[in-house]
């Protein structure tokens, strides 16, 4: 009886968890690196928009051109707000260092 229950459970599991996996033809992972520096807001914005917006090569040319223009505009918008976030974070760090009694270090951070 235990063997029969095991077979039923196995058959049920096969039915419950059966699925197909389609592997995309284009790479899933892109790796970008820098040397002796971090990424700029423009570089990060480009990577961000690549994940958010994709335009098929088979799209009608007029729609594709409009979508590519929108994508470029979005890169500029994302980069702008990233710079705003960086400035805001530096202000936070500046104030924390100044409040902790490190005004010279705080001033160095502010000048970055």
Image (cartoon, helix red, strand yellow):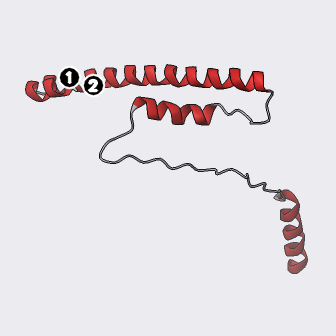
Label disc, if present, on residue 110 of the rendered structure: 1
Q: Where does label 2 land, which residue?
A: 90
Quarter assignment of residue 22 = bottom right
Where is residue 63? Give x, y as percent: 76, 22
The residue nearer to you, when weighing 69 against 95, is: 69
Quarter assignment of residue 89 = top left
CB of mark 1 within 8 Å of CB of mark 2? yes
Quarter assignment of residue 84 = top left
In the rendered view, would you say 9 is above or below 41? below
Element carrying mark 2: helix
Crowding near the residue tagged with mark 2, few <14, some 14–19, many ≥20 C-alpha atoms within 10 Å: some
Crowding near the residue tagged with mark 1, few <14, some 14–19, many ≥20 C-alpha atoms within 10 Å: some
Element carrying mark 1: helix
In the drawing, does residue 17 fall left or right of residue 70?
right
In the drawing, does residue 27 fall left or right of residue 98?
right
- Residue drawn at point x = 44 percent, y = 20 percent: 80
Where is residue 6? Give x, y as percent: 85, 74
């Amino acid at each position: 009886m235990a063997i029969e229950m095991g077979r039923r459970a196995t058959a049920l599991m096969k039915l419950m968890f059966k699925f197909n996996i389609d592997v995309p033809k284009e790479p899933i992972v892109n790796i970008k690196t820098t040397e002796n520096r971090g990424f700029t807001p423009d570089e990060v914005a480009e990577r961000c928009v690549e994940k958010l917006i994709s335009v098929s090569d088979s799209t009608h040319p007029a729609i594709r051109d409009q979508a590519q223009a929108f994508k470029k505009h979005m890169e500029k918008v994302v980069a702008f707000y990233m710079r705003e976030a960086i400035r805001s974070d530096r202000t936070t760090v500046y104030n924390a260092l100044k409040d902790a009694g490190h005004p010279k270090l705080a001033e160095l951070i502010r000048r970055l």
